Amino acid sequence: MISRREAAQRLDIPLQMATRHGLPTRMTEQELERIDTDPPPWLRQSRENRTGRTPVWVELVCSVCGYHEAVRPKKWWPEYRYLSCDHHGADELPAPEPGLARTEVDGLGSRFIAIVDAPA
């Protein structure tokens, strides 16, 4: 059985859309495969309207421990060099290259810090 959230990720739709259109909280692989191969009108329209510019889901992965989660991307996220779980220390990542200054941006996903290296 897979969750509604996982089904939304695999169908590449927002969780809110999955809920609104009645996807159950749990479904089998076969049920998901049926929806994916013979999409209902709302899913077909959603796929046709996608421009491809912004992904619906992204996979965030910690550069230190490899913890990962799929989340909806936000427009305010910076271009980052590394991602780190909020409990890791800065000394667990490679130092910035000479001439670059490092800043940290909190709040990506449930626990990530974006490490941004930019010209000093």
Image (spheres, rainbow, N blue to C red):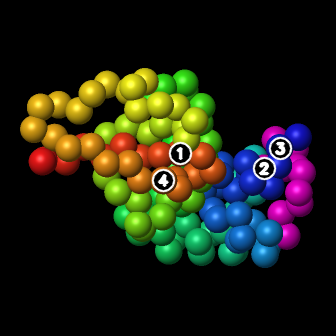
Check whether the beta carbons of the residues at disc 2 and disc 4 lie within 8 A of each other: no
**Label 2 to label 3: alpha-carbon separation:** 9 Å
The answer to whether residue 30 is left or right of residue 15 is: right
The answer to whether one can see residue 72 in this image is yes
Picture layout, residue 2 above or below residue 45:
above
- Please name which of the two marks, 1 or 3, marks the residue nearer to the observer: 1
* Residue receiving disc 3: 2
* Residue receiving disc 4: 106
**Percent position of residue 56, x then y:** 54, 60
Amino acid type, label 1 = Phe
Picture layout, residue 116 above or below residue 97:
below
**Percent position of residue 57, x then y:** 55, 54
**Label 1 to label 2: alpha-carbon separation:** 30 Å
Among the 4 quarters of the image, the one containing residue 83: top left
**Percent position of residue 26, x then y:** 89, 51
**Label 1 to label 4: alpha-carbon separation:** 7 Å
The answer to whether residue 43 is left or right of residue 80 is: right
Quadrant in which the N terminus is drawn: top right
- Please name which of the two marks, 1 or 2, marks the residue nearer to the observer: 1
* Residue receiving disc 2: 32
Res 112 label: 1
User: In what element is the residue under mark 4?
Assistant: strand
Disc 1 or 4, which lies upstream in sequence?
A: 4
User: In what element is the residue under mark 3?
Assistant: strand
Picture layout, residue 49 above or below residue 103:
below
**Label 2 to label 4: alpha-carbon separation:** 35 Å
Res 104 label: none
User: In what element is the residue under mark 1?
Assistant: strand
Amino acid type, label 2 = Leu
Query: For the magenta stretch, what is the residue range?
Result: 22-32
Disc 2 or 4, which lies upstream in sequence?
A: 2
